Image (spheres, rainbow, N blue to C red):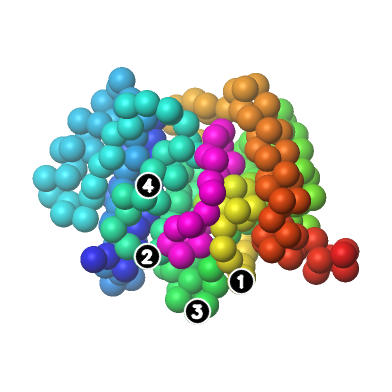
Amino acid sequence: MYELTVIIPTFNEESNIERIINEVDLVFSQSKINGEILIVDDNSPDRTIPLVNLLKITKANLNLLVRKTDHGLSQSVADGFIHASSEIFIVIDADLSHPPALIPIFYAEVNNGHDIVIGSRYMKGGGIKEWPFKRRVISLGATFLGRILFPTVSDPVSGFFAVRKTVIIEASLKPKGYKILLEVLGKGNWEKIKEIPFEFVDREIGSSKLKFKTIIEYARQVLDIVLFSISHPQSATWREWKKVFGV
């Protein structure tokens, strides 16, 4: 049984996969964390899968889940929740946009009683480095919609977060698109959240997988969470609205 599982969703990440695995494993070693690295791959046609299998020979804590159907980042993360061998999960991108050095801090905050720990680009101390203008605009728009649901969370659509298994074990998640955290916030069973600032760095190698379809899926996701919250007045969304608006 591991103390922590780092879930890394992948698709065509042959250029980054060795580095991210080695960096996460080094953090585990330096922090003395008994951690699992779980690669959840959408059946990449490049060399991602063979490279992971090669690394598995020397890394006993490295596991690989290959998904043959229903591809998508959120779906991959949700499958990772099911197959992880621990009670605490951290989701991190494979493209080195998120700093593995923060993993011990996230882990410590969960152990300190927080149900969800979010890496925030938009709180004081956070930021976005070398991001194209178009992606900044899309991200800010997505964050604005997310903050309508969760006004007290500065970055409800972050892809870098930690969560207890108990938060999602009975949640009615409908993972689609790229914003799995919003789904967890909207439908998970949580009480305490902590945000940690970090600087998002755009991928150095490879291409972004953001498509127009992703924006449509996100809009549908927001609507679904609103409808879910209306029909579940004890949900986290209702609780957050009550805090801010006194409803």
**Image point (27%, 65%), residue name:** 2
Q: CA distance from mark 2 to mark 4?
A: 12 Å
Q: Is residue 122 left or right of residue 116?
A: right
**Image point (29%, 34%), residue name:** 66
Amino acid type, residue under disc 2 in the picture: Glu
* Above or below, 183 relative to 133: below
Do residues under tags 4 and 1 come within 8 Å of each other at their CB atoms?
A: no
Task: State whether residue 234 appears in this view.
Answer: yes
- Which numbered marker is on residue 63? none
Please tell me which residue lies in front, 49 or 203. 49
Q: Is residue 208 left or right of residue 219?
A: left
Element on which disc 4 rests: helix
Q: Which residues are magenta?
A: 161-181
Q: Position of residue 46 (x, y in %)?
A: 30, 22
Mark 1 or mark 3, which is nearer the start of the sequence?
A: 3
Element on which disc 1 rests: loop
Q: CA distance from mark 2 to mark 1?
A: 17 Å
Where is mark 1, residue-wise?
A: 192
Where is mark 3, residue-wise?
A: 112
Amino acid type, residue under disc 1 in the picture: Lys
- Which numbered marker is on residue 80? 4
**Image point (43%, 28%), residue name:** 71
Mark 4 or mark 3, which is nearer the start of the sequence?
A: 4
Q: CA distance from mark 4 to mark 1?
A: 23 Å
Where is mark 2, residue-wise?
A: 87
